[in-house]
Amino acid sequence: MWEAIKKWWQSFKEWFASLTNVEEEPVPSFTDGLPAKGYEYNDVRDWWERTWSTNEGQETILEVYKEEPTGEWKQLMIGYGDRVFYEEEVNDNGGG
């Protein structure tokens, strides 16, 4: 009889331990969706970017998402001689 109780207790302990070993789901970031929107990660500049062009490619603008040292994200539009002409903080819940 003690063997049956020990076996049951061991099974119970294993079952209970499995309840506490739940793997947490990773929290998605807005950057997860950027590749599907045409952005590529530029590891030299350490930002996400995509290029817009007009006039059959004669004029181009770079649209960028860049993480600041504070952890906040900014959206930048760069063109016309590498000049930033638009800058906005990104809401991490829905940006990108």
Image (cartoon, helix red, strand yellow):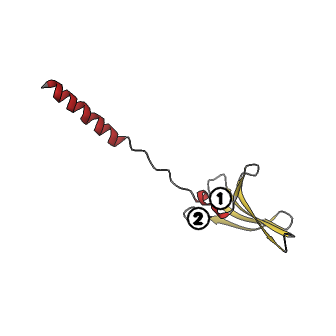
Vertical comparison of 22 with 6: above or below? below
- Residue name at image x 68 percent, y 64 percent: 75
Secondary structure at numbered mark 1:
helix
Specify the quadrant that holds the N terminus. top left
Locate residue 92: give its quadrant: bottom right
x and y percentages locating residue 18 in the rendered image: 34, 39
Occupied quadrant, residue 68: bottom right
Kindly indicate whether the residue at mark 1 contacts the one at mark 2 (C-beta within 8 angstroms). Answer: no
Above or below residue 60? Residue 27 is above
Q: Residue shown at 53%/55% (left/top)?
A: 28
Q: Residue at x 65, y 58 (%)?
A: 35
Using residue 31 as the reference point, say whether residue 60 is left or right of it: right
Q: Is residue 46 left or right of residue 10?
A: right
Could you tell whether 96 is left or right of 10 in the image? right
12 up-or-down from 89: above or below = above
Q: Is residue 66 left or right of residue 33?
A: right
Whole-percent x, y for residue 26 in the image:
50, 50
Q: Residues within 10 Å of mark 1 (few under 14, many from 20)?
A: few
Reading the image, the residue beneath label 1 is 35
Residue 18, labelled with which disc? none
Pointer 2 residue:
91
Q: Secondary structure at mark 2?
A: loop
Question: Quick one: quadrant of the C terminus?
Answer: bottom right
Residue 48, position as x, y percentages in the image: 70, 57
Say which label, 2 or 1, has the lower sequence index: 1
The answer to whether 82 is drawn above or below residue 41 in the figure is: below
In the image, what residue type sits under mark 1?
A: Pro
Q: How many marks?
A: 2
Report the front residue among 1 and 90. Answer: 1
Amino acid at dot 2: Asn
